Amino acid sequence: MMGFAHLIFLSTFLSVSMTSETFDAMEGEAFVIKCPRWSSAVKFTWYHTHTKKIIPAEEERSRVFSFKRFLWFLPTSREDSGNYTCDIHFSNNSTKSFNMSVQVHPYKQGVCFPSQIRYPNDTGRGKIVCPTIDNYTNATIIQWYKNCKPLQGQRYFKAEKYIFINNPRKEDDGYYTCRFIYTHKGNVFNVSATRIFISKAKHSPLPPQILFPKDKSVVEVELGAPLALKCQARLGIKKQPIAVVTWDVDNIPVKSLDFSRFHEKNHFFEGHEQEHYRETTLHVTEIRKEDLQANFTCVAVNEMHNTKATVTLQLKAQYGKIYDAYVIYPKSHTNEANFVEYFVYQIMPDILENKCGYKLCIYGRDIYPGEDTASAIEKRMQKSRRLIIVLTRQLINCKEQAYDQHIALYNALIQNDTKVILLEMETIGTYEKLQESLRFVIKQQGTIKWKKQHTVLSQSSNSKFWKQVRYHMPLRLKSSHSADAG
Ligand SMILES: *[C@@H]1O[C@H](CO)[C@@H](O)[C@H](O)[C@H]1NC(C)=O
Ligand SMILES: *[C@@H]1O[C@H](CO)[C@@H](O)[C@H](O)[C@H]1NC(C)=O
Ligand SMILES: *[C@@H]1O[C@H](CO)[C@@H](O)[C@H](O)[C@H]1NC(C)=O
Ligand SMILES: *[C@@H]1O[C@H](CO)[C@@H](O)[C@H](O)[C@H]1NC(C)=O
Ligand SMILES: *[C@@H]1O[C@H](CO)[C@@H](O)[C@H](O)[C@H]1NC(C)=O
Ligand SMILES: *[C@@H]1O[C@H](CO)[C@@H](O)[C@H](O)[C@H]1NC(C)=O
Ligand SMILES: *[C@@H]1O[C@H](CO)[C@@H](O)[C@H](O)[C@H]1NC(C)=O
């Protein structure tokens, strides 16, 4: 029985002595420690634990002073190492005491943090918060360091009080120090604080990027017509815990607007290398005059940051379409003769232009890579009645920039009023690895499949393949001179 009582006594004793917290500071920097917050506290007293010497409030030229529940060192000095107690006085005359131990680490060349790190480790997806900075009003971070070397590079996104490491890996583990300055009554002090980061990334955010619409772009509309505005953003690697893509109309969230006029629909999907995309479409049931004055802003948010893109509306110009079809195909990056290019440059123009009298716009023939591409493509796509998309196996797992750019434009601009014709030049089998928007169209309308044996007959506009293509092309009013009119 005695032994038992002893144990209880011992554990009580241990828990008491463990309430003494230790704080580490660098010599010559500003430093502050805090007594716990207590709602019924009326007064705090700070003193040196052993001498019981009270630490008074700030006076002129005082370096160490108390201010309510804070004990300030402006700046620290080596002799400040020691034990401090704060007494909390309550309204009913009772008090509570807390012991704190301060260790001031002498300045050494090349050492930027104390050997002991007392701030909790950051494990995770890349966010590293600058410790203690909230204790210092109007502090500004001057520099971040990893293992005492200044942090540089695009992988580090710097916010006011934290950094974000883009897609953190094992190599990112280490000691991260933020150095900030604090100004007190005109005197400037350095402060630094260090914490350990251990990456544990299951998913990681990327700086949110809106792929479309382009910021400040103008969308052509007709009064009374419905409108669907799509916004697509890339938010990170793998599914994100915070992933919002939403629309505001003149800064008012669509959710707060009249549902019968505005509503939004969204979905997410995974792109190349597990990139997480979210797409939200704002549906306007009918365009009114006042909408032409409004700012439609897409906002993309993840745990790292947020970004916006604003579009405005203008009445549709009354031009006619000048091409019957715009042709998109994956460009080969080898110099070898390639059937798809032969098909796009030779066979298709021969049948559709020469024999059937259509006018095509072919990227690489009518628009050259490098020519102010984005806007040239945009204009010509808008002036095309159809969009012919050539599908090959090359599209699977390949990042063909021009192709991606085209598809993005298609998504952004013309999806609603241009019909798509999908030509499957090689059996693709599973469409799963294709872009989401392509999968969607394939699911809706299927593809026209090119068969090897077509090659022999390919020059005939009467082949089954070309008949199917022509069926989807716009009606030709003027018949061409060739014998394909049937
Ligand atoms: C501070 O208190 C601890 C026990 O809590 C003691 O071990 C240490 O020696 C004290 N430090 C000083 C400088 O008195
Ligand atoms: C607290 O102490 C003061 C002076 O010692 C006394 O006047 C007051 O009544 C006390 N209050 C309580 C709630 O005990
Ligand atoms: C604080 O430290 C002093 C001296 O070591 C000790 O007497 C006192 O009990 C401690 N107080 C607390 C609340 O731990
Ligand atoms: C923080 O990380 C260091 C280094 O891996 C480790 O030694 C320490 O125990 C960790 N601290 C906590 C509180 O997890
Ligand atoms: C912090 O900065 C703001 C704006 O610059 C200023 O109004 C305020 O007085 C500053 N506060 C302190 C405590 O310096
Ligand atoms: C703050 O640190 C920088 C860099 O170490 C140093 O150049 C500067 O003199 C320091 N300022 C003060 C007020 O200690
Ligand atoms: C729309 O945005 C522009 C540019 O930011 C701004 O000048 C204009 O006042 C905004 N219009 C409305 C109605 O908020």
Image (tube, rainbow, N blue to C red):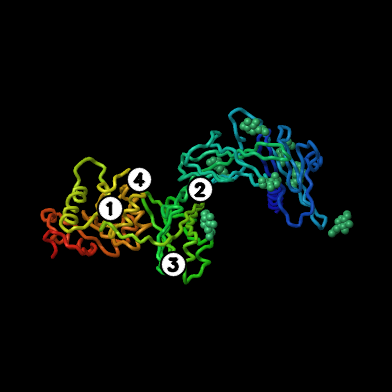
**Which secondary structure lies at badge 1?**
strand
Can you identify the residue that label 3 sits on? 287
Callout 1 touching callout 4 (CB < 8 Å):
no
Q: Earlier in the sequence, mark 4 or mark 2?
A: 2
**Identity, as a three-letter code, of the amino acid under mark 1:** Ile
**80 left or right, relative to 469:** right
Q: Quadrant of ligand 6?
A: top right
- Residue occupying image coordinates x 48% and y 70%: 259
Q: Earlier in the sequence, mark 3 or mark 2?
A: 2
- Residue occupying image coordinates x 49% and y 52%: 307
Query: How far apart are labels 1 and 3 at the CA level?
Result: 31 Å
Can you identify the residue that label 2 sits on? 124
Residue 237's disc is: none
Residue 372's disc is: 4
**Which secondary structure lies at badge 4?**
loop
Query: Label 4: few (<14), some or many (≥20) within 10 Å?
Result: few
**Residue with the most extreme bottom position:** 260
Which one is nearer the viewer's eye here, 228 or 67? 228
**Identity, as a three-letter code, of the amino acid under mark 3:** Ile
Query: How far apart are labels 3 and 2 at the CA level?
Result: 46 Å
